[in-house]
Image (cartoon, rainbow, N blue to C red):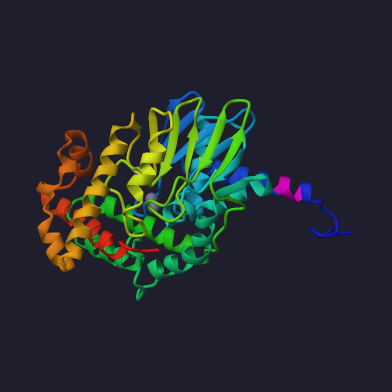
Amino acid sequence: MILGPTAGASLLSLASIRAAWAQASSANAPTNLFDIQPVAEDAYFAFARPQAVANCNATIFVNWADVLVVDAHSKPSAASALIAQIRKQITPKPVRYLVDTHFHWDHAQGNAGYREAFGQDLKIISSAATRKLEATLLAPRLQASLDPHGLPFSSQPHIPVLLDDARKQLSAAHSAQQRAALAERVRQLESFAREMRNFHPELPTVTFDKSYVIRDRAHDLHIEFHGRAHTAGDVVVYCPQKHVVATGDMVIGTLPFLGDSYPKEWPITIDSVAKLDFNRVCGGHGNVGHGKQRMMDQRNYIEELAERVENGKTAGLSLADIQKSIPVSSIKAFSDDDYGRLVSSGRDLSSMQQAVDTNIEHIYTRLGQN
Ligand SMILES: [Zn+2]
Ligand SMILES: [Zn+2]
């Protein structure tokens, strides 16, 4: 007699088969996508190495019997890769909680990788607003980014165009080193497109409005919504005993992205987060922040830019005129040496101005959004 899964196998054994399979597949997952470093006892920062299609950083809290991970990257296989690294470099304990700090593709498209590895025991946690945004925006935005004729949202890579470009550069490459780098870029773009072709979002299973607290024997973890900022639903994960806060893209180690933001509310939200007691800030991009200075510098940058764009708009200036009226050299927030150096690192003046112009454009369109 042959038993089909519905006839013979219990849910438990199905779950264990699935877990064993996931363990086997994660054993083969690449272990070079992230650089993991401790930030406090039982708290780790996973820095996402640059890839053709970006992944976000993750923050990892090791609880008494399980693990909480903050943010899930741009694809399930990147999540599997981090799971393999966690097992190898940190702990064999299972991931029981995954937090989506916000709905963006590079933080939530990897959710399914955690579900696959940990089955129904895994809770995926977000604000109610984030779950709603994931349900409505993740799939269509991804589709536009994979469609050769699509018009992707400004934070998303347009994969067919990038692929075309990389293939052209590859055929014109002069050195073996250039060829190898471009061939790797083509490989990464193709593999992303292949993996994500049939993507269905794996949505959060636990949502809340203001706060969700996990009281563990190792420490407490507070998942908190302090107000709208980078998106309508950003949450931070705060561990009071370890003095660590994971901020998603609300506070990052590069220039902020404002395309889905609430520019006038964002600084107020940061002020509220800054009242917590922490000394390590683990953001969704860039490296770890020490203390609160960088967070306040970013807050001041957003406040300054939002005010100047709003004044220009009120005076009836066009977007182009407002952009012209705000050269990089006039931005006070950049005169703090550390912040100026941080956000301009790897950029020359013209690409820096371009990046600020994009911030200005986003503020211009987002001001007054409900
Ligand atoms: Zn984001
Ligand atoms: Zn991001």
The residue at the point 13 percent across, 49 percent down is 328
Q: In front: 282, or 240?
A: 240
Q: Quadrant of the image for the C terminus?
A: bottom left
In this view, the residue farthest toward the right is 1
Residue at image location 41% in from the left, 52% down from the top: 228
- Indicate whether residue 44 is drawn in magenta: no
Query: Does residue 142 show up?
Result: yes
Residue 16 magenta: yes
- Total labels drawn: 0
> Is residue 47 among the parts visible in the rendering?
no
- Main secondary structure along the magenta-highlighted residues: helix
Q: Position of residue 154 (x, y in %)?
A: 32, 63
Q: Please, is residue 308 above or below residue 57 in the view? A: below
**Residue 262 appears at what percent x and percent y?**
35, 56
Give the image location of residue 17, x and y in percent: 71, 48
- Work out whether 164 lies above or below 236: below
Which region of the structure is painted magenta? 13-17
Q: Quadrant of residue 3?
A: bottom right
The residue most toward the front is 314
Locate the N terminus by quadrant: bottom right
